[in-house]
Structure formats: structure tokens, C-alpha cells
Amino acid sequence: MPSASQIQINASRLQQRIQELAQIGKIGETGVCRLALSKEDREGVELVKSWMQEAGMEASIDPFANLIGVLKGSNPDAPILMLGSHVDSQPYGGRFDGAIGVLGAIEVVQTLVEEGITPECNIEVVAFCDEEGCRFNKGLFGVRGMTGKLEANELERTDKNGITRREALVQFGCDPADFESYVYQEGRIGAFLELHIEQGPVLESLDAPIGIVSGISGPLWLTVEMIGFAGHAGSVPMSMRQDALLGCAKIIVALNELVRQEPGAPTVGTVGSLSVFPDSRNIIPEKVSFTIDLRDIDLRRRNAVEAELLSVIENVSREHGLTYTIREDTNSEPRYCANWIKQSLHQEAALMGLTPPELMSGPFHDSLTMSYVCDYGMIFVRCLEGISHNPKEYASPEDITLGTELLYRTARRVATEKGGFQP
Ligand SMILES: [Zn+2]
């Protein structure tokens, strides 16, 4: 373990900021709700912006609603070192998811400035807009925007109240007409580093405060709609029903069985959202729409589960007289961290007296999108019992300090070495 004198970042300042940000959109004692582009999100972004300025950066919000802080290097034309994560949250979220990556990155820059270190390249700290994806049912919006990867009709997606993303952006003060001129040119970003809580139980089980990510497993997101026929719950005989919810229930059970087929494999599948029409006690459900989230580090295995699931949906629909549609919302392949960044992380960690294990990430992160435009690396911080997307989410100040210190040392190394970005 590194001694206190080895820690160069200001750990108490970082903790103070984490606690202060957690007051915005606070739910209960320890939870937060800062839905993307909401009033609370805006308040959080403004607070974080003030800390960026305090740290010595110029900060602004781009048309995708990303908050970007810039620390000028001595060679501003060199490819940028980008650091960051997100400050939006789930509706029932915790204080650390995303937040430590943004606030940790600000701490990195502030420490550099206080140490009188001028980086070779510009360092940019970004709080990406809408990583979580819960409001408009599609995440990683800001990072996909700035890297030119938005899809058609994204602005017409609506939230539960019928507000489109376009309307929400405009309300936030962003103008979608400006999108194009704010996309980063190819090659402009040299590398991306993200600090994040693990959101899983692996580091805790290894008794390791921090870990180095080897890659992010690819999520497949589907929305399935099944349509049957409504009828009186008291009069239609069981054999004559076309009950869409019953069909859906069978698919939920089947998904659970399919992802457990291979013992020890990290395959996971979840139905997390369900809506029933007409949603009445004495009407046979006519229409059910539900989401499927399927992930694996091994794309072949994930594809095999998907194929089996599709045939289950087909068979169940036939059995119950249902029609169905499947919409693919997101389909990403596993993306691996750059070897040279992992090496730098391991070497800097060793200098701190640490030997962090390598692990895969099941959840996706802003890094997933960044991986298509530059090399990336990720540091994971242990979190209590692997709990996340839950107000009970917790990472200790000591562990966050170690993760941020490693981020600081690695960023300093990459940004101060001439030609620090290795192919
Ligand atoms: Zn996150």
C-alpha cells in the first residue's frame, strides 16, 4: 500500500466534491436521481463546471450537452489526452457511478496545475451527456455525438412523458443545428482514460482496492413487443386466450435459462422494463412491450444465446397466438483496452506499491464509444458488495484515492512524455 506521503492528489478535496455533487438530485440518505438533461442534471453540470474552472481549465458545454474542460498544453496541436466519465444517473442511482471519473479527472488536472506541470498535449476533461440511457432508452449520447456516431432519428426518441431528446436538448440550452461543427476530427483525440467504480463484486472478492480493465463486454439491447387479443378475464376460456403477458413471462424464464447454460461463463441476460396494455385487473393483456439486455465478453457465445432466444420468441408466439416485433436498440461488440495503456497503468501502479488485477467490464461505459476513435484504458475502483444503480452503492474514500492517484500518475506520464501516445 502506498504511504500517505506518496499520494499527490488532494484526496480530501476530491471527497468533498463527491459529497457536494451527491446533494444534487439527492434521494433518501445516499441515493441520487439526475436524469440526463433534467433540471438536476443541469445543476450538477454547472457545479462541476465551476470546479473545472477552479482547477485551471476553460470549461464549456457543447451542443451534445457534454461539459468539456480544457487545460492547454505546450503543443496544443498534438493529439489530446482525454479524461472523463458522466454525471447523469439512473432514477434510483448511487453517488459514485460516473461521478468519480469526472471529479477524479478534475483532481488530476488541478494537481498537475498545482505541481506546476505543463503537459505536452492538451488535456480535456469531459462529463459526457446521458451515458446511462434510461430516459430516452439509448445511452452514450454525448460521447457518440462528439465522435460523430449518432444514428438517424435519435433526436425524435421520447421519454416517458413524451418529451423528445431534441426538446430536452434545446431546453438544456443546446442547439442541434450546431452538431456537425463540434464533432472531433479523426486523430484529434490521442487517448482516453476513465476511472469508474467496478459495479460488480470481482475486486472485492480478490481483496483488491483497484483493478485495471482489460476490455468491455458488448451489450445487446432489444425491445420486444408482443400482441395478443384483449378479452374479459372472467369469461374467455383459457384455451381460447391470446395472452401477451403470459408469452412474455415464458420468454423471461427462457432467457434466464439460456444465459446459465455454460457454467462459469460471464454471460448475463436481464428483462428490466415491462409495460402491459391495457394494464387492467380483469382484462386479458393484449400488448406487452419489454426490454432485453444481453451481455458477454465472448461475442460468439452472445450471438448463440441471441439466436436461441429468437427461436423461443417465435415458438412462444405461435403457441399463444401472438404476433411480435423486435427492435434492436444497441448492438456492440466487446472492445479491448490498449496494451500500451494497460502497461503504463501497471507500471505506475507498481511504483505506488500496488499490483492491481486485470478484469473485464460487464457494464458499458463512455470508454466503449471512445474505443472506436482512440486507444483507451480504464481503472476500476472496488465497490461494496458490487452494488450499483442503487442508492446503497458505496466506494471507500481510500479506494477512490488510490484509483485517482493512479489516474493522475498515468495521465501525467502520457501527457508529459513527448510522443507519449504509442501506436
Ligand atoms: Zn457509469
Image (tube, rainbow, N blue to C red):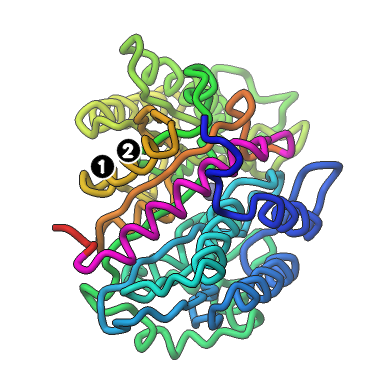
User: Cα distance, mark 1 to mark 2?
Assistant: 5 Å
Please tell me how many numbered marks the rendered image carries. 2
Q: Nearer the viewer, residue 63 or 416?
A: 416
Q: Is residue 422 left or right of residue 226?
A: left
Q: Give the magenta part as a residue range.
A: 391-419
- Location of mark 2 (residue): 346
Residue farthest right in this picture: 28
| Magenta span includes 394 | yes
Q: Position of residue 179 (x, y in %)?
A: 41, 84
Q: Position of residue 11 (x, y in %)?
A: 65, 50
Q: Secondary structure at mark 2?
A: helix
Q: Is residue 292 left or right of residue 81?
A: right
Residue at 52% of width from left, 71% of height from top? 113
Residue at 54% of width from left, 22% of height from top? 204
Residue 376 in sight from this viewpoint? yes
Q: Nearer the viewer, residue 350 or 82?
A: 350
- Location of mark 1 (residue): 343
Q: Amino acid at mark 1?
A: Gln
Crowding at label 1, few (<14), some or many (≥20) Cα neighbours within 10 Å?
few
Residue farthest front in this picture: 5
Quadrant showing the C terminus: bottom left
Q: Position of residue 71 (x, y in %)?
A: 46, 77
Most common SS among magenta residues? helix
Q: Amino acid at mark 2?
A: His
Disc 1 to disc 2: CB gap under 8 Å? yes
Q: Is residue 250 left or right of residue 22?
A: left
Q: Quadrant of residue 120?
A: bottom left
Residue at 62% of width from left, 75% of height from top? 168
